[in-house]
Amino acid sequence: MTKILCLAAVLALSGTLVSAQTSSPTPAPVTTPAATPTPAAAPSAKPDLTGTWTLNLGKSSYDPVPAPESETIVFSKTGSTCTMATTSDNERGKEVYALPFSTDGAETPTPKGVFADTATLQYLSTKGEWQDAALILTQRIMYQNSPGTLKSAFNLSADGKTLTRTMHISVDQGEFDTTSVYEKQ
């Protein structure tokens, strides 16, 4: 695409220079495929994140946040509703939960009963939206009875085999950033 645009610019500039150097009347512009302006780029295709993804701890970075011992996430989609189901073994024990969301920027409340009222970490809602080819999930949480937010960007590798999640955590204890690398199963 870049080569076509550069060629179009060179051809357009060449035509201007040739016209300026000749004494004959300037002919009407001729439209050629290379000189035809290209329409604005179509929105980038949204990658298909559906499937099962297993955490690769060796490629992930959690410091200073404690890393899970293991984690699997499953993305699924039914109609306009997406779900991120997570199974994680971490310092809080084994956690298994599924969080619904849409990708239209609307906030989706977490259904009642997904988390016990006494759970250290509770997801209250999830808002999903696409920014270019990245899925952005913004989640309102309660951590140790205090409100907080998690903002994650999920980026799929070109070969579709690696999913990288960069997450910014904002809680009463501070601001933290983690990177989790998952492999397609």
Image (cartoon, rainbow, N blue to C red):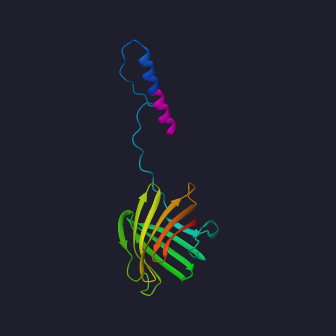
Vertical placement of residue 28 versus 38, above or below: above
| Above or below, comparing residue 182 to residue 43 in the picture | below
Task: Between residue 98 and residue 115, name the one nearer to us.
Answer: 115
User: With 63 as the anchor, is 100 left or right in this view?
Assistant: left
Whether 112 is drawn above or below 12: the answer is: below
Snapshot quadrant of residue 163: bottom right
Magenta-colored stretch includes residue 7: yes
Residue plotted at (45% across, 26% down): 13
Residue 114 position (above or below residue 40):
below
> Magenta span covers which residues?
1-11
Q: Residue at x 38, y 81 (%)?
A: 112
The one of 102 and 124 positioned closer to us in this rendering: 124
Q: Residue furthest top?
A: 23
Depth check, front residue: 77 or 65: 65
Q: Give residue 83's position: percent from left, percent from top.
A: 44, 70
Question: Measuring 44% from the left and 15% from the top, which residue is drawn there?
Answer: 21
Query: Which of the 4 image quarters holds residue 57?
Result: bottom right
Magenta residue check for 160 = no
- Identify which residue is drawn at 45% across, 21% down: 17
Magenta highlight: main SS: helix
Q: Residue furthest bottom?
A: 118
Whole-percent x and y of residue 59? 62, 65
Whole-percent x and y of residue 177? 52, 68
**Image quadrant occupied by the C terminus:** bottom right
